[in-house]
Amino acid sequence: MSASHQVHNAGAIGGEGHGHTHRVSVIVPTHNGADMLAECLEALGRQSYHDFETIVVDDASTDGTGKLLSRTPDVVALHIPGSKGHGFVA
């Protein structure tokens, strides 16, 4: 990962700070998908299996995705900066 990438809530990666390493990582790529992302994260929260971490890769979103992710401390957010989507995260 280059230095230009921003990582929020990184303490959740690999369970650091939680005393637990998750068995599964759910990786969700997004670009301007805040509405669908909120629904996705809610659905993940309702799963009966809980031994997972959620990592969202935000590809230069401009629709409030970053704000949504800042309000979800249990989600690891990787922000790819820029003024347009890069397309490679999907």
Image (cartoon, rainbow, N blue to C red):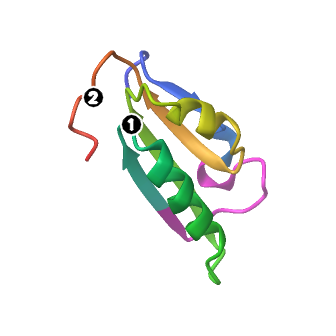
- Disc 2 target residue: 85
List x then y, in percent, for residue 5. 44, 23
* Screen quadrant of the N terminus: top left
Q: Which corner quadrant of the image does residue 82 belong to?
A: top left
Viewer-nearest residue: 35 or 58 = 35
Q: Quick one: which residue is furthest to the bottom in this view?
A: 48
Q: Label 1: how many residues lie within 10 Å, few (<14), some (14-19) or many (20+)?
A: some
Q: Is residue 11 left or right of residue 54?
A: right
Q: Is residue 53 magenta?
A: no
Q: Of marks 2 and 1, which one's residue comes earlier in the chain?
A: 1
Give the structural element (helix, strand or loop) at label 2: loop
Amino acid under disc 2: Gly
Q: Position of residue 57 (x, y in %)?
A: 42, 41
Query: On residue 48, which mark appears?
Result: none
Question: Which type of secondary structure does the marked residue at label 1 adopt?
Answer: loop
Mark 2 to mark 1 CA distance (whole Å): 9 Å
Residue found 69% across the figure and 41% down from its top: 11
